[in-house]
Image: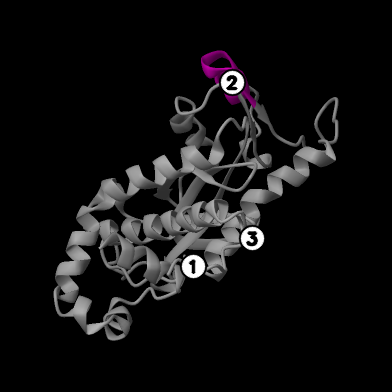
Amino acid sequence: MLAVDLTAESLGIDSEHQLFRELPVAISSKIERSVYNRRRCKLFFVKERIRKALSEKLIGSENYFIVGCMPLEVCKLSRSSRAKICKEDYLTSPSKGYCASQNMNFYGYKLHAVCSSSGVFCDFELTAAAVHDIHYLKNIKHNFSSCVLLGDKAYLSADYQLDLFISNNIRLEVPMRVNQRNYKKQSYLLRKIRKRIETLFSQLCDQFMIRRNYAKSFDGYRTRILSKITSVTVIQMINKLLNRNMNNLKTLIV
């Protein structure tokens, strides 16, 4: 089940109807499509453990990490008032939000993530679109220690920088605003490393079509997101074992 799920994501097949049309009869005859969907959702935490185990092996002793987020629409803003997607529970319902980097209002979720400087996803979380980026730092500070965390201007906060340093010796590096007192431009090397997570997000949007949604429930939606991120990690592991460029994600896992 997991092999079929991850292979489908790497091939860009995010429609289960299309997947079962392309699967060999020997596989598709053994499980019905709706049963496959339910079992895939139930394997969420198993898949997450696999992803974490692979990412730990890929990261090794790196101590530079990048934090960022991207908007994920579940439907167009004009349909948000009558849409029923992912609204089965108030706590996990989507909401309206604003993305400053893309200068757009949207309805859905935010994907918050941390990746290593080599481009491996270490941690991620889905929140409603209305949640500000900086609140994600509260949840990740216990998962990292004695490292440098690079972020954009959305994470600019002296209080959070001090809290991360005191609690787990995490140095939060954020570019200063031009109108700040004692302004100092961030070094070119740190700005270059920071772009790694933007490249990962672009690959998720392009090859893995993370912004295209066919799920109706939140469990189905988060399972799709996890499958895409796990598929990225599996391809990176295959590339590393074969001594290829780890971030050449066009390599198929078949």
Is the residue 158 above or below the residue 177 in the image? above
User: Is 29 part of what is drawn in magenta?
Assistant: no
Residue 102: image tag: 3
Nearer to us in this view, 150 or 86: 150
Quadrant where the C terminus is found in the figure: bottom left
Nearer to us in this view, 123 or 247: 247
The colour mode here is one colour
Q: Is residue 214 left or right of residue 231?
A: left
Identify the residue under disc 2: 146
Q: Is residue 210 left or right of residue 158?
A: left
The residue shown at (45%, 73%) is 11
Per the image, label 3 sits on a secondary structure element best described as loop
Nearer to us in this view, 228 or 137: 228
Label 3 sits on what residue type? Gln
Instruction: State the count of labels.
Output: 3
Identify the residue under disc 1: 208
Residue found farthest to the top? 166
Label 2 sits on what residue type? Ser
Q: Is residue 78 visible?
A: yes
Residue 69 in the image: x percent, y percent? 55, 49
The residue shown at (49%, 67%) is 208
Residue 128 in the image: x percent, y percent? 41, 50
Secondary structure mainly formed by the magenta segment:
helix
Nearer to us in this view, 236 or 226: 236
